[in-house]
Image (spheres, helix red, strand yellow):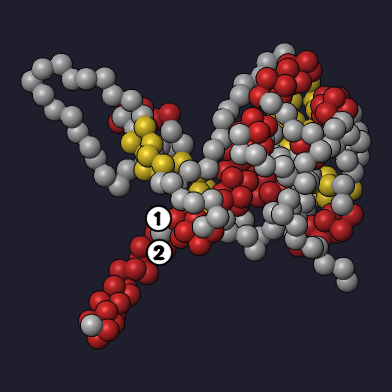
Amino acid sequence: MNELISTPERLDTTQHDQIMAEHLHRYALAAGYVKDKTVLDIASGEGYGTHLLSAGAKMVYGVDVSELAVSHAARKYQKGNLLFKQGSAASIPLEDHCVDIITSFETIEHHDLHDEMITECRRVLKPGGLLIISSPEKKYYSDLANYRNPYHVKELYGHEFRALLLKYFGNVSFLNQKYVTASVIIPEQGTADIRQYHGTYEKLLSEDTFTPLYHIALASDAALPAISSSFYMHDIPPDNKEARLAALYTGSTTWKIGRAVLGPFLLIKSLFKR
């Protein structure tokens, strides 16, 4: 039996890094819109994201150009409301107007049939249906980073991505995403607008409000100065993968509990080393 081969452009569930966090965050966002809906996930790859969406959706189709990826996903993720099909973004193997929601994350840069892809999305979407799609920003991803991804065929600048979608849809909202290792400070009255996402390849979770570990206060008898949200980025060298991985996990509850349990033993060990 042929096994699915990992590539730098196909995330699989053995990865626990920046790319994992970026992709799971996108699926967590999309999961909030799919309850009791019929969903299409274009470029479903290994299948983990399609599977995660199926937890709340009525039906989810995963479409991928790779026959090997489709057969792998169909074996690994078996549910009554989940079906994987082979097909391309420019030729979707579904009937007209049959899905409520389409998700397509980091797909459009892997081919140059952009108009054909969005035309196909319009074809399979029901009237009033929703497309949730992502694309790397060429200016920052490639130009300023002096980087060329060999797997990318045609990247888009933000204004090109915007123009493409507005050509086919009457209403479009844009979000910006960036992975950071950071400390976040948010005014208390603004936390109602912040939603926290977390989880794993098996299950995505969300919380309605931002839950702080610390409180910071400004106090005075005079009028207080204006305050705004901010974050402090922990700059880590891009080639230091170990540091990035550590930063991803050291904020987790599991790590903190483990550290608390092992703390006394680590202290004793350090004393004996002196």
Q: Position of residue 180 (x, y in %)?
A: 48, 43
In the image, residue 145 above or below residue 213: above
> Which quarter shows the C terminus?
bottom left
* On screen, residue 193 above or below 22: above
Percent across and percent down for residue 165 are 74, 21
Residue at 74% x, 33% y: name it: 155
Residue drawn at x 87%, y 52% is: 66
- The residue at the far top in this view is 170
Which residue type does callout 2 highlight? Trp
Q: Amino acid at mark 1?
A: Gly
Visible residue check, residue 24: no
- Is 164 rendered above or below residue 241? above
Image height of 62 relative to 117, above or below: below
Q: Residue at x 83, y 50 (%)?
A: 84
Spatial CA distance of label 1 from label 2 is: 7 Å
Q: Is residue 120 left or right of residue 29?
A: right
Extreme-left residue of the structure: 221
Element type where label 2 sits in the image: helix
At 68% from the left edge and 20% from the top edge, which residue is drawn? 159
Name the residue beneath numbered marker 2: 255
Is 145 situated left or right of 153 in this image?
left
In the rendered image, residue 265, in percent from the top left (x then y), is placed at 29, 80
Q: Quadrant of residue 221?
A: top left
Q: How many marks?
A: 2
Instruction: Please name the residue that numbered disc 1 is placed on.
Output: 251
Residues under numbered marks 1 and 2 in contact, where contact means CB atoms less than 8 Å apart: yes
Crowd tier of the residue under label 2, counting other residues whose Cα lies within 10 Å: few below 14, some 14–19, many 20 or above:
few
Mark number, residue 193: none
Instruction: Quadrant for residue 256, please give it.
Output: bottom left
Q: Nearer the viewer, residue 241 or 143?
A: 143
